[in-house]
Image: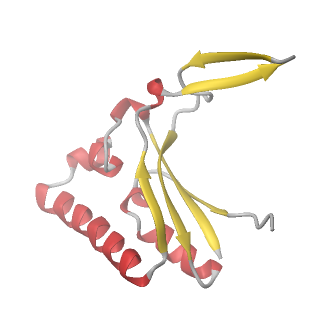
Amino acid sequence: MKYLLLIHSNPVTWGHPSFLHTEEGIKLPKSAREVLAAQLDDLIAELKASGELLALEPLEEPGRAKVVRVREGVRAVTDGPYSEAKEQLAGFFLLDVATPDRAEEIAASIPEAQFYAVELRPIANLG
Protein backbone atom coordinates (compact mmCIF):
# COMPACT_ATOMS: atom_id res chain seq x y z
CA MET A 1 0.00 0.00 0.00
CA LYS A 2 1.44 3.33 -1.01
CA TYR A 3 0.93 6.45 1.07
CA LEU A 4 1.97 10.05 0.79
CA LEU A 5 2.75 11.72 4.11
CA LEU A 6 2.36 15.46 3.66
CA ILE A 7 4.14 17.61 6.22
CA HIS A 8 2.62 21.03 6.80
CA SER A 9 4.27 23.97 8.56
CA ASN A 10 4.00 27.70 8.99
CA PRO A 11 5.82 29.65 6.26
CA VAL A 12 6.70 32.38 8.78
CA THR A 13 9.17 29.97 10.39
CA TRP A 14 10.16 28.18 7.19
CA GLY A 15 13.16 25.89 7.34
CA HIS A 16 14.03 22.21 7.31
CA PRO A 17 13.50 20.20 9.35
CA SER A 18 10.50 22.38 10.12
CA PHE A 19 10.10 21.28 13.74
CA LEU A 20 13.41 22.97 14.60
CA HIS A 21 12.09 26.30 13.29
CA THR A 22 8.76 26.43 15.13
CA GLU A 23 8.30 28.78 18.06
CA GLU A 24 7.96 25.74 20.32
CA GLY A 25 10.98 24.01 18.76
CA ILE A 26 13.21 27.05 19.19
CA LYS A 27 12.28 27.20 22.88
CA LEU A 28 13.35 23.59 23.47
CA PRO A 29 16.71 23.00 25.14
CA LYS A 30 19.49 22.17 22.68
CA SER A 31 19.59 18.59 23.92
CA ALA A 32 15.86 18.12 23.16
CA ARG A 33 16.31 19.60 19.69
CA GLU A 34 19.19 17.18 19.08
CA VAL A 35 17.02 14.25 20.21
CA LEU A 36 14.28 15.23 17.73
CA ALA A 37 16.79 15.64 14.91
CA ALA A 38 18.29 12.22 15.71
CA GLN A 39 14.78 10.73 15.85
CA LEU A 40 14.14 11.97 12.31
CA ASP A 41 17.51 10.71 11.06
CA ASP A 42 16.90 7.30 12.65
CA LEU A 43 13.40 7.08 11.17
CA ILE A 44 14.68 7.89 7.68
CA ALA A 45 17.47 5.30 8.01
CA GLU A 46 14.98 2.67 9.25
CA LEU A 47 12.55 3.34 6.39
CA LYS A 48 15.33 3.21 3.80
CA ALA A 49 16.66 -0.06 5.24
CA SER A 50 13.19 -1.66 5.26
CA GLY A 51 12.46 -0.52 1.71
CA GLU A 52 9.35 1.34 2.87
CA LEU A 53 10.67 4.79 1.91
CA LEU A 54 10.27 5.45 -1.81
CA ALA A 55 11.01 9.19 -1.73
CA LEU A 56 11.51 12.02 0.73
CA GLU A 57 11.84 15.68 -0.22
CA PRO A 58 11.61 19.05 1.49
CA LEU A 59 9.94 21.84 -0.47
CA GLU A 60 11.08 25.41 -0.99
CA GLU A 61 9.18 28.11 0.87
CA PRO A 62 5.66 28.83 -0.45
CA GLY A 63 6.61 32.23 -1.85
CA ARG A 64 8.65 30.41 -4.51
CA ALA A 65 5.58 28.48 -5.69
CA LYS A 66 3.74 29.21 -8.89
CA VAL A 67 0.15 28.36 -9.76
CA VAL A 68 -0.64 27.38 -13.35
CA ARG A 69 -4.15 27.49 -14.77
CA VAL A 70 -5.37 27.06 -18.33
CA ARG A 71 -8.68 28.68 -19.20
CA GLU A 72 -10.07 28.57 -22.75
CA GLY A 73 -6.64 27.44 -23.96
CA VAL A 74 -4.76 30.33 -22.35
CA ARG A 75 -2.12 29.60 -19.74
CA ALA A 76 -1.96 31.91 -16.73
CA VAL A 77 0.88 31.64 -14.21
CA THR A 78 0.74 33.47 -10.90
CA ASP A 79 3.37 33.71 -8.18
CA GLY A 80 3.00 32.50 -4.63
CA PRO A 81 1.12 29.70 -2.98
CA TYR A 82 -2.36 28.72 -4.05
CA SER A 83 -3.63 28.62 -0.50
CA GLU A 84 -3.67 31.50 1.97
CA ALA A 85 -3.78 29.03 4.85
CA LYS A 86 -1.66 29.51 7.96
CA GLU A 87 0.16 26.25 7.26
CA GLN A 88 1.62 25.26 3.91
CA LEU A 89 2.99 22.04 2.47
CA ALA A 90 6.64 21.79 3.58
CA GLY A 91 7.66 18.36 2.32
CA PHE A 92 6.64 14.76 1.89
CA PHE A 93 7.48 11.13 2.47
CA LEU A 94 6.34 8.61 -0.17
CA LEU A 95 5.93 5.21 1.47
CA ASP A 96 5.13 1.66 0.43
CA VAL A 97 3.95 -0.17 3.56
CA ALA A 98 2.12 -3.39 4.38
CA THR A 99 -0.82 -1.89 6.29
CA PRO A 100 -2.61 1.39 6.98
CA ASP A 101 -1.59 1.02 10.65
CA ARG A 102 2.08 1.01 9.64
CA ALA A 103 1.57 4.24 7.67
CA GLU A 104 -0.07 5.84 10.73
CA GLU A 105 2.77 4.60 12.95
CA ILE A 106 5.34 6.21 10.65
CA ALA A 107 3.37 9.47 10.44
CA ALA A 108 3.24 9.65 14.24
CA SER A 109 7.02 9.04 14.38
CA ILE A 110 7.86 12.11 12.32
CA PRO A 111 8.87 14.90 14.75
CA GLU A 112 6.74 17.45 12.84
CA ALA A 113 3.64 15.61 14.09
CA GLN A 114 4.42 17.07 17.55
CA PHE A 115 4.31 20.63 16.20
CA TYR A 116 2.25 20.66 13.00
CA ALA A 117 0.05 18.32 10.99
CA VAL A 118 1.23 15.30 9.05
CA GLU A 119 -1.43 14.40 6.52
CA LEU A 120 -1.64 10.74 5.52
CA ARG A 121 -3.00 10.17 1.99
CA PRO A 122 -3.40 6.75 0.36
CA ILE A 123 -2.17 6.66 -3.24
CA ALA A 124 -4.95 5.69 -5.65
CA ASN A 125 -4.34 2.69 -7.88
CA LEU A 126 -5.29 3.78 -11.39
CA GLY A 127 -4.17 0.51 -12.99
Asked if residue 74 is positioned above or below residue 125 in the image, the reply reads: above
Q: Is residue 83 left or right of residue 117?
A: right
Q: Position of residue 94 (x, y in %)?
A: 53, 63
Q: Is residue 74 or residue 17 the one in the foreground?
A: 74
Residue 33 relative to residue 81: left or right: left
Residue that appears at 83% across and 18% down = 73
Q: Position of residue 54 (x, y in %)?
A: 49, 68
Q: Quadrant of residue 97?
A: bottom right
What is the x, y in percent for residue 59?
43, 42
Number of numbered markers: 0
Which one is nearer the viewer's eye here, 117 or 126? 126
* Rendering coords of residue 15 (x, y %): 31, 40
Quadrant of the drawing holding the C terminus: bottom right
Q: In this image, 108 relative to 34: left or right?
A: right
Q: What colour scheme governs how the chains and residues are painted in the rendered image of this protein?
A: secondary structure
Q: Quadrant of the N terminus?
A: bottom right
Q: Relative to residue 101, is residue 29 drawn left or right?
A: left
Residue most toward the right?
72
Residue at the (40%, 76%) spot, across then down: 47
Residue at 45% over, 80% down: 51
Identity of the residue furthest to the left in this view: 30
Relative to 1, does residue 124 appear above or below in the rendering? Answer: above
Q: Is residue 67 above or below residue 53?
A: above
**Among the 4 quarters of the image, the one containing residue 26:** top left
Name the one closer to the observer, 69 or 109.
Answer: 69
